[in-house]
Image (tube, rainbow, N blue to C red):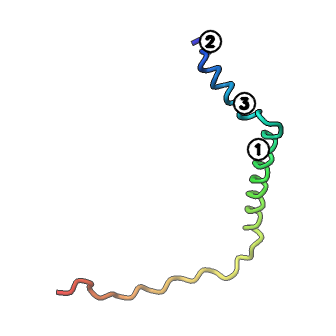
Amino acid sequence: MGGLSPIHWLIILAVLLLVFARPGKLSGFMGDAAKGIRAFREGLKGDEDKPQGEAAKPLPPPTPEKDPIVR
């Protein structure tokens, strides 16, 4: 339990290669995440700016239906 086996080191190496393989890949990922967060915040602000308009109208009373089973 104290040390890492060779399989663990290979998994760690694979993750590091995926994250840092190309220059700019990590910064591109973080930029995309920042754009998503910014769009989410703007979407939340947009809901507050909308006018409420008229209140919701109540539903009409249900009409009695005929018995669907015909004998």
Q: Which is more toward the observer, 36 or 67? A: 36
Q: Residue at x 29, y 88 (%)?
A: 66
| Residue 24, image quadrant | top right
Q: Amino acid at mark 3?
A: Leu
- Residue for badge 2: 3
Q: Residues within 10 Å of mark 3 (few under 14, many from 20)?
A: few
Q: Is residue 19 above or below residue 13?
A: below
Q: Quadrant of residue 16?
A: top right
Quadrant of the rendered image containing residue 56? bottom right
Q: Is residue 42 left or right of residue 70?
A: right
Q: Could you tell me which residue is drawn at 82 percent across and 41 percent down?
A: 27
Choose mark 3 or mark 1, whichever is in front: 3
Q: Residue furthest front?
A: 22
User: Is the N terminus in the top left, top right, bottom left or bottom right quadrant?
Assistant: top right
Going from N to C along the chain, the mark reached first, 2 or 1, is: 2
Q: Nearer the viewer, residue 68 or 26?
A: 26
For the residues marked 3 and 1, what is the alpha-carbon distance in whole angstroms? 15 Å
Query: Which type of secondary structure does the marked residue at label 2 adopt?
Result: loop
**Mark 3–mark 2 CB contact (< 8 Å):** no
Image quadrant containing the C terminus: bottom left
**Location of residue 54 with respect to 37 vertically, above or below:** below
Q: Which mark is residue 29?
A: 1
- Residue topped by disc 3: 17
